[in-house]
Amino acid sequence: MNQNPAPSTRKQNAYRLIWRWHFYAGLFCLPFVLWLATTGLIYLFKPQLEPLLERRYAHVSTAPAQPASAQVAAALRAVPGSVLNAYVLPESPEAATRILVGHGSELIRVFVNPATLQVLGVVRENDRFMKVIFYLHGELLLGSGGSMVVELAASWTILMLITGLYLWWPRNARLGGTLYPRLRQGKRIFWRDLHAVIGMWISLFALFLLLSGLPWSKSWGGMLHTIRQTYAANTATQDWTTGSASERAQIKAENTPASGEHAMHMAMGMNMPGMDMGDTQGGMLEDYSPIDRLVPIATAQHLAPPVLIAPPSQHAPHWTARSDADDRPSRSTLTLDAATGAILQRTSFAQKPLLDRIIGYGIAIHEGALFPPINQILGVFTALGLMTLCTSAIVMWWRRRPISTLGAPPAMATARYPYALITFLVCLGVFLPLLGMSMLLVWLIEWLCLRRIERARVFLGLSAQA
């Protein structure tokens, strides 16, 4: 007698096993998905929200502007002990000048009236609204530990979406309840179809957003950085950071004056317009007078705004003018000669290594900046879809939850993992190491502990069933 299960039985067992992984992935992910979708939805509107939040600095003067070096001196006096990090080219002659100054790993934005040199505002970069949203989204405001948690949640969400696509994929050419909801078959069918249809339409968009966000993460992004260093380190500087610790290290390098022939000290700095002979601390020891020569040169190049002009530092040994546009493929960087204003080198996005360009496109799409407003609309559609998925999942679980149990699909005593499923889970675990390690940990805890505890076994649906 043939003891092997029939093909239909094997498919049913595989379906139940995948359903079980989908259930537990959702159980862990739903709070984080709601959090990431909400904060990501807010961040999508950065181009609209930042000008609104800083509207009081949009029209501050109609008089001729003072030299850029004088504006820099005013900003440095407002933050004693600081150095110039970058001068942001004004996008309008009436707008306040944004000047970034720093000390150590801290970055501060100073708003200066370009005509009167009056300091209109001083704010830490990390205290700006969109920066807070950025760290809430990527790190839960918990630093590297928070980044690991978000990466773990994102990895399990990827598993949840892939298993969900398998579970809800249309079979037998049935499109109702998969590509469109059936609205006249009762509440139970309505919530089931809402979950399935929304999932089918947004899963690929959501998977792209999750994968394109991984380069920012502490663990996965750190490993990618290590791989990148093997072939791209000498050709281009990495254009993204892997968590707040990486960003602080970069800012510290930018705030540390260059040594050797590129260092410029007090003897030259005395000629800066607006500088008092008594200004001898911190950033006042540096000579930023070349900026007066470099501002018109950078302006004439028509780089994508915002354009940051930065002095020599440990991060870059020459003066630079770089585009910091959210649309990363439009960015360019100029290396400038301080004495003559000559452009020593121009680096465009197209000259970056292939890996950097792929990630640059991914980040731009992730932030809704590549082809606005369509990119933003797709981001809003995906975020709202994820929120709907979470809501419908909770409603479905609540409506059909069994008494005194969690409601997970029960494990089958004779069920075996198909080789294709095992291969898929192993490959996914290798690609997403935090997911792989946590899946292994969940399996070990279930196998070695939970199955041996009667109440836990019943509650989690681990009771052996034929």
Image (cartoon, rainbow, N blue to C red):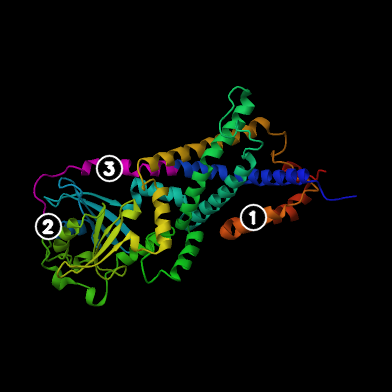
| Mark 1–mark 2 CB contact (< 8 Å) | no
Q: Which residue is mark 1?
A: 425
Q: Amino acid at mark 2?
A: Pro
In primary-sequence order, the first of circles 3 and 2 is 3
| Mark 3–mark 2 CB contact (< 8 Å) | no
Q: Amino acid at mark 3?
A: Pro
Q: Nearer the viewer, mark 3 or mark 1?
A: 1
Residue 207: which disc?
Answer: none
**Residue 345's image quarter?**
bottom left
Q: Residue 173: where, in percent of width, then height?
A: 63, 35
Query: Residue 312 vs residue 212: left or right?
Result: left
Residue 67: which disc?
Answer: 2
Q: CA distance from mark 3 to mark 1?
A: 45 Å
Q: Nearer the viewer, residue 14 or 270?
A: 14
Q: Is residue 27 visible?
A: no
Q: Amino acid at mark 1?
A: Leu
In primary-sequence order, the first of circles 1 and 2 is 2
- Magenta residues span 39-67
Query: Residue 281 vs residue 235: left or right?
Result: left
Which secondary structure, mark 3? Answer: helix
